[in-house]
Image (cartoon, helix red, strand yellow):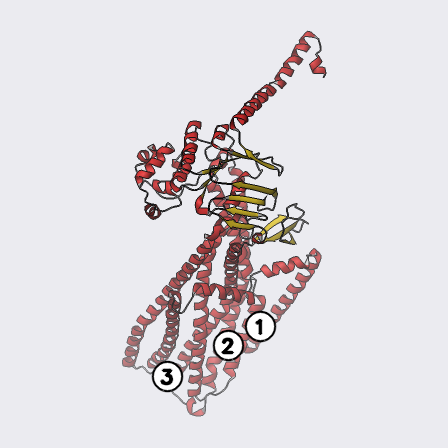
């Protein structure tokens, strides 16, 4: 009667699962029709959804080839030792199950001496068993760290090669939080893949070896029926089918959780980076609101995962704990109840031994099967981590090859040759269209390396958003030709420097420029690195590089004297003083430290972008004259007329795509500048004079020709 009830319950569960699945599919179809989602958009999103499919295995195999490069690698050695430990643990489990049966037999037979010997053997076997258990966890952690280390080395190599760290956030729109992918995603993948290996390989071995042990035991008792095996496999297959049918898309859910977690971290980093500006503006309420919204979005996704895990785990427990227990009792009892007549008259102690051993083996096998079943959920989560890590590596490699993908609003006037746009609706479905533009800039423009010449031939200045600032720029700069660059904001002055430094691609024409080692760029806000005072002057060189160049601290003191920073060494306690130089140095001191780097590196060309705006005019003039005397060709963006006299040529942008290059007549230009300032001063007083004239006319009751005109 109990068996019949259990069968009815199992059938009802399976029927309910099938009905639920069918209803879910039907509802999805109706909802899709009601929303009228575009087929192309749905297909595109489906391709991006992480799942356990061929794409997942291809991505996983590719990453594992990076993680475990050869059989002679450290990672492969750890994997081999880990595998041996898992195998030895399985044999220990079989031996302990047999030892349990012998202990039960000695208890039933009331053989105290045998019982004591078996208990002593139990304690002795416990030592290697506990060691192997702890060793398995230790090796799993070591293997995860080794895989993560290998992946981090590979990813960092791609990230810092060819200025990818700049391009991934400024020229490409696929990785909004590269720092999160390089830290959290790599750690999560490494831990997940090693845990999955332990969760799958050892249970598979447990099932094979323990099933073999059960079959051997059954044959010894004269039972040759295949019914217990058929019952076990039927229950196992039915459980796997139901769980596979009703398993949520954990890979997609975990990938989305990781994305939202990365965005929350990004918002936090923005607050830390711009804390002073936010404090000046009093923008804490807006930043607080953004953080709360980001965290609420993450919490909402986590609650969604918790809810789906709740129902799925409940179904898992019902099938694996109760249904499997029922099937296990049948499988254990069958060999004893259906044995041959000559074995049916065996003693109670022998039957107790067989039952205990079979029960322990079956429990271990069932536990192994349960771990394999439950590991599917973890495999789908691994699919999410694998997708994100694979996407990160693919983006880095694409950028290495000069391929970028940017997202822009449809209808934008931005365009570029060789750009392929793929449109899709936004997630809210409000009709806004976005397009992902795939760019191959290297095929559009030509870059030639020269030793001492900068030549632009019909080179356009195009921003990462594909906005054309200057359609066609031709320019030649030779050593000793000091170029002053002027123009309104947004006209392309700093953009030109980014193209010369290789930060932005050349979308057309031909660019001839010297190697990066002969050009040095100083921005308006120089970067202060971590390290001591010496590191600030020689950046990006190291102390070893400085020694190879034959430069000593005395040379550095002379450089600081040139930029009027000689007092810094004494004030901060010597060259080895370490501090947060971004906060220790004032704005003017940081700009002079940036100029000090020019005199240390002595490049052929110096690209100066408003780099002395916080420095006094007399100190500024001395630094520029010293740079010219050192044979450094200056390309300077500045609004200070006091610097005009240090330049020989002028590149002037008009802000509408136009430009002109001419020799710079400093005296004539200063005269024109003074006349401009006088006219501005005179015109600034006209509104006040007109207002006073109106007041006088009102008092006198008279009119004025100037007011009537």
Q: Quadrant of the C terminus?
A: top right
Q: Residue 349 carries which label?
A: 3
Q: Which mark is residue 327?
A: 2
Residue 422 location, quadrant: bottom right
Q: Position of residue 194 (x, y in %)?
A: 43, 65
Q: Residue at x 53, y 76 (%)?
A: 235
Mark positioned earlier in the residue sequence (1 or 2): 1
Q: Where is residue 303 in the image (x, y as percent from the top left)?
A: 54, 54
Q: In which quarter of the image is the N terminus?
A: bottom right
Between disc 1 and disc 2, the foreground one is 2
Mark positioned earlier in the residue sequence (2 or 3): 2
Q: Residue at x 62, y 59 (%)?
A: 44
Q: Could you classify mark 3 by the number of other residues whose Cα lies within 10 Å: few (under 14), some (14-19), or many (20 or more)?
A: some
Q: Residue 9 carries which label?
A: 1
Query: In the shown orientation, is residue 675 left or right of residue 160?
Result: right
Answer whether residue 522 is visible to the viewer in this image: no
Residue 607 to residue 299: above or below: above
Q: What's the distance in space between the residues labelled 1 and 2, CA to CA?
A: 13 Å
Asked whether the beta carbons under mark 2 and mark 3 sit within 8 Å of each other, the answer is: no
Q: Position of residue 315 (x, y in %)?
A: 54, 66
Of the pair 270 and 258, the residue shown nearer to us: 270
Q: Could you classify mark 1 by the number of other residues whose Cα lies within 10 Å: few (under 14), some (14-19), or many (20 or more)?
A: few
Residue 542 to residue 632: above or below: below
Outermost residue, top side: 700
Query: In the shown orientation, is residue 306 left or right of residue 435?
Result: left
Query: In the shown orientation, is residue 153 left or right of residue 692?
Result: left
Of the pair 205 and 171, the residue shown nearer to us: 171
Q: Could you classify mark 2 by the number of other residues whose Cα lies within 10 Å: few (under 14), some (14-19), or many (20 or more)?
A: some
């Amino acid at each position: 009667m109990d068996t019949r009830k259990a069968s009815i319950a199992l059938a009802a569960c399976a029927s309910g699962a099938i009905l639920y699945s069918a209803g879910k599919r039907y509802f999805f179809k109706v909802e899709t029709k009601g929303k009228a989602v575009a087929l192309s958009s749905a297909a595109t999103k489906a391709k991006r959804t992480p799942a356990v499919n061929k794409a997942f295995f291809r991505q996983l195999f590719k990453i594992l080839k990076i993680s475990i490069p050869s059989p002679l690698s450290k990672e492969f050695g750890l994997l081999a030792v880990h595998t041996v430990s898992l195998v030895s643990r399985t044999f220990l489990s079989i031996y302990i199950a047999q030892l349990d049966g012998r202990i039960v037999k000695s208890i039933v037979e009331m053989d105290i001496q045998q019982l004591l010997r078996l208990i002593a053997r139990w304690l002795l076997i416990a030592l290697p068993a506990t060691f192997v258990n702890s060793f398995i966890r230790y090796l799993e952690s070591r293997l995860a760290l080794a895989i993560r280390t290998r992946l981090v080395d590979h990813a960092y190599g791609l990230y810092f090669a060819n200025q990818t760290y700049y391009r991934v956030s400024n020229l490409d729109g696929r990785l909004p939080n590269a720092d999160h992918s390089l830290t959290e995603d790599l750690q999560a993948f490494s831990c997940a893949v090693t845990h999955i290996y332990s969760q799958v390989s050892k249970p598979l071995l447990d099932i094979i070896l323990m099933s073999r042990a059960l079959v051997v035991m059954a044959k010894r008792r004269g039972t040759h029926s295949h019914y217990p095996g058929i019952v076990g496999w039927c229950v196992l297959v039915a459980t796997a089918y139901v769980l596979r049918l009703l398993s949520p898309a954990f890979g997609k859910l975990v990938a989305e959780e990781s994305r939202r977690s990365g965005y929350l971290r990004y918002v936090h980093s923005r607050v830390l980076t711009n804390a002073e500006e936010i404090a000046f503006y009093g923008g804490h309420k807006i930043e607080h609101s953004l953080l709360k919204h980001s965290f609420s979005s993450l919490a909402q996704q986590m609650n969604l995962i918790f809810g789906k895990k709740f129902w799925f785990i409940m179904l898992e427990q019902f099938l694996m704990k109760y249904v499997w227990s029922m099937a296990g009792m049948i499988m254990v009892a069958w060999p004893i109840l259906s044995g041959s007549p000559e074995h049916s008259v065996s003693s109670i102690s022998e039957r107790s031994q067989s039952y205990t051993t079979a029960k322990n083996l079956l429990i271990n096998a069932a536990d192994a099967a349960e771990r394999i079943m439950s590991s599917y959920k973890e495999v789908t989560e691994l699919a999410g981590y694998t997708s994100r890590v694979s996407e990160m590596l693919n983006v880095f490699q694409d950028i290495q090859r000069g391929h970028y993908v940017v997202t822009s609003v449809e209808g934008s006037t931005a365009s570029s040759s060789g750009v392929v746009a793929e449109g899709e609706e936004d997630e809210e479905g409000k009709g806004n269209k976005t397009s992902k533009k795939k760019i191959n800039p290297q095929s559009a423009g030509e870059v030639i390396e020269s030793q001492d010449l900068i030549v632009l031939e019909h080179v356009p200045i195009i921003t990462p958003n594909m906005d054309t600032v200057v359609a066609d720029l031709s320019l030649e700069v030779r050593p000793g030709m000091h170029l002053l660059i002027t123009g309104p904001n947004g006209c392309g002055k700093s953009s030109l420097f980014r193209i010369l430094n290789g930060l932005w691609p050349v979308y057309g024409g031909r660019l001839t420029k010297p190697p990066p080692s002969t050009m040095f760029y100083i921005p308006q806000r120089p970067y202060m690195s971590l390290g001591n005072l010496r590191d600030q002057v020689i950046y990006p060189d190291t102390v070893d590089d400085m020694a190879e160049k034959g430069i000593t601290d005395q040379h550095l003191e002379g450089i600081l004297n040139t930029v009027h920073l000689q007092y810094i060494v004494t004030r901060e306690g010597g060259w080895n003083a370490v501090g947060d130089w971004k906060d220790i140095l004032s704005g003017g001191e940081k700009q002079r430290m940036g100029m000090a780097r020019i005199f240390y590196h002595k490049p052929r060309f110096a690209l100066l972008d408003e780099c002395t705006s916080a420095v006094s005019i007399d100190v500024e003039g001395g630094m520029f004259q010293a740079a010219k005397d050192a044979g450094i060709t200056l390309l300077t963006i500045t609004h200070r007329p006091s610097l005009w006299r240090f330049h020989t040529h002028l590149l002037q942008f008009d802000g509408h795509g136009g430009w002109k290059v001419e020799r710079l007549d400093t005296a004539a230009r200063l005269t024109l500048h003074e006349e401009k300032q006088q006219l501005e001063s005179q015109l600034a007083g006209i509104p006040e004079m007109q207002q006073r004239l109106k007041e006088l006319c009102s008092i006198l009751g008279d009119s004025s020709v100037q007011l009537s005109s």
